Image (spheres, rainbow, N blue to C red):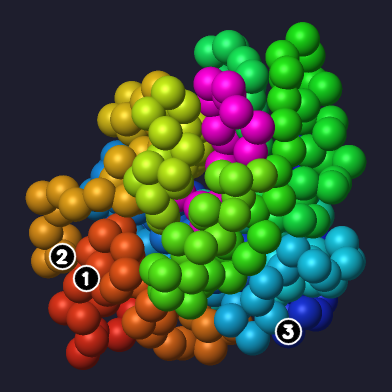
Amino acid sequence: MRESPSATDPATHPTAPTGPGPRPDAKRVAFVDSGLGLVGYAAALHEAAPGIRLVLSLDPDHMPWGPRSPQAVRERVLAGARAALELRPDAVVIACNTASVHGLDAVRDELEPDVPVVGTVPAIRPAAAAGGPVAVWATAATTASDYLQGLLEAFATGTLTHRVAALGLAEAVESGDLDRVDACIAAAAAATPGGIRALVLGCTHYGLVESRIAAAVGPGVTIFDSPHAVARQTLRRLGLDPSAAPVASGSAPDSTDSTDSTDSTDNPVEAVLLSGRPGRLPAALAAYPAGARLLGAQASRTRRAPTLRP
């Protein structure tokens, strides 16, 4: 069990909410990322457990995090988690691979055991288990990282793997410019060796355009992403039944890049924080089905301020 930090300086280290037993109201989960990468993960959790309230903590003032130093990333992740803590979440999800590498332990040290913290890891293990060759698309920083090399050595030994830097794709997704997105996808597809059987999405932004990536790499390639696995782990950490979360067997979760019958009146989004400030989801989200659903939910809550727990 990790030690809780001292609460002598609440401005720097907000005290995690405590209290006896489960709360009678709906669970609340905060997602932390530099930008829109958290959307697919929030959508996957909402699909698995529609009653859970969502707090989305983005950092547009400092996006992207990838090129920053490990210490700078750690500071930004902590800032995003601390801002979300004001809404008293029951769990925090670090919906960014880079942030999970450099900031997950720091956030856990500060929030756990009172608030469970869940990180994200590229789905290399299931991709390798399904048989290679395997390509991993990621940012330039992740592609060149010892972290990714360690994952490949741990989970893909004996499997032919290729690391591909999908240059500019995360930023293109963030912009909502689909022409720019398609150009970045085409460049990454051209840089991907032929004959691969599996493609791992190594950046949380990429799941928002999974169907466009699938079209570019062809029908013989199975795409692996991790939002549903993270949703199941989040439910487990909340003490809830994870069996409701769909198991993505050989594809990124359709809920992040396809239309479905989810009604925006479900109102899953309780609060949006932009570099710590209350705000609204970026209009660029309308370019993606999962984002459009969350925007619709946000619109229906426009006149309703988030309810802080007493």
Q: What percent of the width, then of the height, locates residue 130?
A: 53, 13
Judged left or right of residue 215, residue 24 is left
Tell me the element at label 3: loop
The N terminus, quarter of image: top right
Compared to residue 21, the image places residue 87 above or below, namely below
The three-letter code of the residue at mark 2 reads Ser
* Residue 51 in view (yes/no): yes
Is 146 placed left or right of 259 in the picture? right
| 31 part of magenta stretch | no
Q: Which residues are magenta?
A: 192-207
Identify the element where label 2 is drawn: helix
Residue drawn at 79 percent across, 56 percent down: 141
Q: Which mark is residue 264?
A: 2
Q: Residue at x 38, y 50 (%)?
A: 212
Using the image, tell me which numbered label, if any, was put on residue 297: 1
Whole-number angstrom distance, CA of label 3 to CA of label 2: 36 Å
Q: Amino acid at mark 1?
A: Ala
Q: Earlier in the sequence, mark 1 or mark 2?
A: 2
| As drawn, 211 above or below 283 | above
User: Would residue 193 be counted in the magenta stretch?
Assistant: yes
Q: Earlier in the sequence, mark 3 or mark 2?
A: 3
Relative to 118, 245 lies left or right: left
What residue is disc 3 on?
A: 11
CA distance for labels 1 and 3: 32 Å
Q: Quadrant of the C terminus?
A: bottom left
Q: Amino acid at mark 3?
A: Ala
**Considering the numbered disc 1 on the image, is that residue within a helix, a strand or a loop?**
helix
Q: Are marks 1 and 2 in contact (CB under 8 Å)?
A: yes
Residue 46 image offset from top left, x and y in percent = 30, 50
Q: Earlier in the sequence, mark 1 or mark 3?
A: 3
At horizontal 58% and vertical 22% (from top left) the residue drawn is 195
